[in-house]
Image: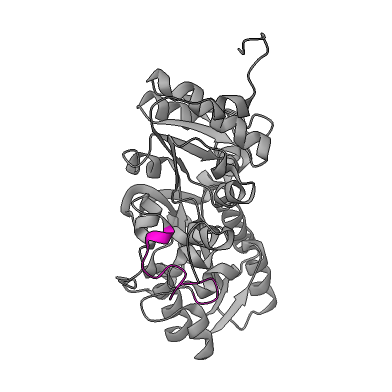
Amino acid sequence: MMADGKKKSALDIIKSYDGPPVRIMEVCGTHTHEIFRLGLRQILPKEVTLISGPGCPVCVTPVSFIDEAIWLALERGVTICTFGDLVRVPGSEGSLATARSQGARVEIVYSPVDACSYAAAHRDEQVVFLSVGFETTTPAACLAVKTAAERELTNFSILTANKTMPQAYEALKDSADVFLYPGHVEAVMGTKHCEGLAERGISGVVAGFTAKELLTAFAVILAKFPQGKPFFKNCYPRVVTAEGSLPGQRLMAEVMEPCDSEWRGLGVIPMSGQRLQQRYAAYDARQKYGVPPMHGRSNPACRCGDVLQGLCTPPQCPVFGKGCTPDHPVGACMVSHEGACSAYYQYGGGNHE
């Protein structure tokens, strides 16, 4: 409460903070961009360090996945259906854009179901959808596979790199003091796992995307962190519930199963991925086409992996704004509009030409 008896606003709490230093990691590409766009970094006190973590699905997709997609396109002659951002993500020796210039068929789609529809309309082509993303988009990939099975589409399959967030929080718990949980993911998964993380000593707050919602989330963090106890708070209750989207969860449980998964910069995180269950093996591109093991090689000058772990900021990468720009990206974090490097570049979060 303020001296005049009025309740302190979120902005008052933030501006008056004089507690211990706190590292807050946002793990949502939309949060990263909105915080920049709204100028919230300029409002936060000097005690707050804001870290952009692995919240961009394109950014955490490993180099080996791009290599697999290129191999399928060039060696197996399949038509790749993908979201636009993935086309320019560098693999070990070029991108899907490079492969397209070499004759590969690469089609841009806006949803997995669009890819399924493309396969239905082009029965003479073998179609592979590149399935990346977190719990927000995985149900749509599951729906596409179910639709293909129901329609007996033998020319459709998916290459999976789907990720789940809870295991990433565990892996990154030493990189941050508090997580700013993504509202989109928690709208699907609910908040029970967040409560479980708090019981295991990992603090976090679910945030929305408006200025008011983000300020509220930061105020809650700065009010609770000095108390020294792990905490969780849902600051996006108009969208996020404890249960989440039960239909979405059921769809994932019906079609997918957990598996170990490689994250760019983080390595393999046990049981942090999603793959198709064996009964849907006919729609698993790795099994269908016998994709060989790939060991991707990143550009050694790119520090995208360190950015995703919070070990450095984008401007601390030697190629940021020089050899690596949105027009000529070296790393995935500059390719995607949700990437941290893209946000820093767009909003002047570092010096670049």
Residue that protrudes farthest toward the bottom in the picture: 102
Q: Quadrant location of residue 317? A: bottom left
Q: Is residue 293 visible?
A: no
Q: Is residue 291 visible?
A: yes
- How many numbered discs, if any? 0
Residue that protrudes farthest toward the front in the picture: 3
Magenta segment: does it hold 317? yes
Q: Is residue 266 above or below residue 300?
A: above
The percent position of residue 193, horizontal first and vertical second, equals: 46, 32
The percent position of residue 8, horizontal first and vertical second, equals: 63, 19
The quadrant of the rendering that contains the N terminus is top right
Q: Is residue 79 above or below residue 286?
A: below
Q: Tell me the residue at 55%/34% (across/down).
A: 206
Q: Quadrant location of residue 171? A: top left
Observer-nearest residue: 214 or 352?
352
The image's colouring method is one colour
Left/right placement of residue 160 relative to residue 150 reads: left
Per the picture, the main secondary structure of the magenta-coloured stretch is loop
Q: Which residues are magenta?
A: 314-328
The percent position of residue 28, horizontal first and vertical second, equals: 53, 48
Left/right placement of residue 221 relative to residue 271 reads: right
The percent position of residue 70, horizontal first and vertical second, equals: 44, 79
Observer-nearest residue: 137 or 97?
97
Observer-nearest residue: 108 or 332?
332
Left/right placement of residue 244 relative to residue 53 reads: right
Q: Tell me the residue at 61%/62% (across/down).
A: 112
